[in-house]
Amino acid sequence: MSTDLQELFQSNRQWAAATEAREPGFFTRLLNQQSPQYLWIGCADSRVPANDLVGLLPGELFVHRNVANLLVHSDLNALSVVQYAVDALQVSHIIVVGHSNCGGVRAAMTNQRAGLVDNWLRHVQDVRDAHEGFLAGLHESLQVNALVELNVLEQARNVCRTTVVSDAWHRGQSVVVHGWVYGLHNGLLEDLKITATSADEVGLAYDTALALVKQRYRQLTVLAGAAAMPSAAGA
Ligand SMILES: [Zn+2]
């Protein structure tokens, strides 16, 4: 790898040329406006490239990413993104996307120390602690992914509770909040069904989605336990 990263510039030139060849005038059309329909709030993990996963082009997805896809009520960075997306760009959908085997969530789950980021991940540990009994009852191999999903539900609910989204709903603006999870192992997105279109729906959407996550991971725990046990017939 060169120190001036020429390989990245070269690949950028190729990408720009191919994009323009495929769709002449692509960049000049985007020059003066963007009108994305979606705001993606995802993890900073390099294996979860937002636009690529959903096949969207530049101009089609407004993106905010941080470690463990958090929406913290005092995070002016994330809140500014949400505010601009809702008020200025008028996006129709806000999607919080977690991913399986998230390093940040794993560190939070297992109390791994990594430095300054531990303070950020404390928010995930708060989610873990809120569901301590449920997580403790799961097979150990499932706990991180379960917390990934619980965290998505929590952050999606946080999005719903921001003044920005709450005000938008109050004035009748259509904004749908979603919570998804991405499988690193298969490249597939799954909907955790916490979909909310108004303040009134948030509580029930959260409770229903939470019950589904718990039910699924309890079933997986039974299966994992059965797989780990020597077969009774063979013993
Ligand atoms: Zn992650």
Image (cartoon, rainbow, N blue to C red):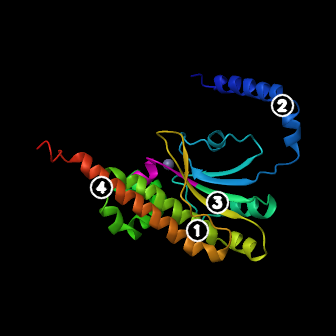
Q: Do the residues labelled 4 and 2 touch (CB within 8 Å)?
A: no
The residue labelled by disc 3 is 78
Q: Nearer the viewer, mark 3 or mark 2?
A: 2
Report crowding for label 3: few under 14, some 14 to 19, many 20 or more residues within 10 A (C-alpha): some
The circle drawn on residue 222 is 4
Closer to the camera in the image, 210 or 25: 210
Q: Which residue is drawn at 46% across and 63% down?
A: 212
SS type, badge 2 = loop
The residue labelled by disc 1 is 158
Q: Reading the chain from its start, which is encountered first: label 1 or label 2? A: 2
Where residue 179 sits: x, y (%)? 57, 58
Q: Residue furthest left?
A: 235
Q: Look at the image and give the residue range highlighted in magenta.
A: 97-106
Indicate the amino acid at tag 4. Val
Q: Nearer the viewer, mark 3 or mark 1?
A: 1
Q: Which of marks 4 and 3 is in front?
A: 4
The residue labelled by disc 2 is 23
Report crowding for label 2: few under 14, some 14 to 19, many 20 or more residues within 10 A (C-alpha): few
Residue 105 included in the magenta stretch of the image:
yes
Q: Are marks 1 and 2 in contact (CB under 8 Å)?
A: no
| Relative to 89, 109 lies left or right | left
SS type, badge 4 = helix
Indicate the amino acid at tag 1. Asn
Q: Reading the chain from its start, which is encountered first: label 4 or label 3? A: 3
